[in-house]
């Protein structure tokens, strides 16, 4: 059986591959490029208080997915860059389960 760390690493790798495949996003006369997916830190799998708070608050116990994106014009000139939150990645507990929406 894989450890929570191994599961997290595999999910992170697959997530980054999927994001890279989805970009660039072209629309009209602008393009949105993915410049960098920030490292996704693994919360401690034995963080019982954090897990309990997620369950009691109907939240997902996980880590935010953050990236740097750039919007470019048709000539490739960068019009702006921004760090954005793309979503939340559930994190495996030490029981190899996930807490999603409590």
Image (tube, rainbow, N blue to C red):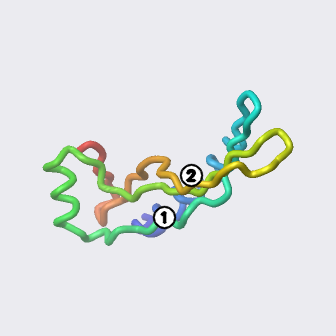
Cα separation between marks 1 and 2: 10 Å
Extreme residue in the left direction: 56
Q: Is residue 2 above or below residue 15?
A: below
Q: Residues within 10 Å of mark 2 (few under 14, many from 20)?
A: some
Residue pictured at 21% horizontal, 63% vertical: 50
Could you tell me residue 87's position as x and y percent?
A: 44, 47
The C terminus, quarter of image: top left
Give the left or right position of residue 30, taking residue 16 as reference: right
User: Could you say which is closer to the camera, residue 15 or residue 86?
Assistant: 86
Q: Secondary structure at mark 2?
A: helix
Could you tell me residue 64's position as x and y percent?
A: 42, 56
Give the left or right position of residue 56, taking residue 7 as reference: left
Whether residue 21 appears in this view of the structure is: no
User: Could you say which is closer to the camera, residue 9 or residue 82?
Assistant: 82
Q: Where residue 15 is drawn, which disc sits there?
A: 2
Extreme residue in the right direction: 75
Residue pictured at 30% horizontal, 66% vertical: 94
Extreme residue in the front direction: 79
Q: Is residue 96 above or below residue 21?
A: below
Extreme residue in the top direction: 28
Could you tell me residue 33's position as x and y percent?
A: 70, 48
Give the left or right position of residue 75, taking residue 32 as reference: right
Q: Is residue 72 above or below residue 43?
A: above
Q: Where residue 87 is drawn, which disc sits there?
A: none
Could you tell me residue 98's position as x and y percent?
A: 32, 52
Question: Circle 1 sits on which residue?
Answer: 40
Residue pictured at 43% horizontal, 52% vertical: 89
User: Could you say which is closer to the camera, residue 61 or residue 10?
Assistant: 61
- C-beta proximity under 8 Å, tags 1 and 2: yes
Q: Residues within 10 Å of mark 1 (few under 14, many from 20)?
A: some
**Which of the marked residues, 1 or 2, is nearer the chain's N terminus?**
2
């Amino acid at each position: 059986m894989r450890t929570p760390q191994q599961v997290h690493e595999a999910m992170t790798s697959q997530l980054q591959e999927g994001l890279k495949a989805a970009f660039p996003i072209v629309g009209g006369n602008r393009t949105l490029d993915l410049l960098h997916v920030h490292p996704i830190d693994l919360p401690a799998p034995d963080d019982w208080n954090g897990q309990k708070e997620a369950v009691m608050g109907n939240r997902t116990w996980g880590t935010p997915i953050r990236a740097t994106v750039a919007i470019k014009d048709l000539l490739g000139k960068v019009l702006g860059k921004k760090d954005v939150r793309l979503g939340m990645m559930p994190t495996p507990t030490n029981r190899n389960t996930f807490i999603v929406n409590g």
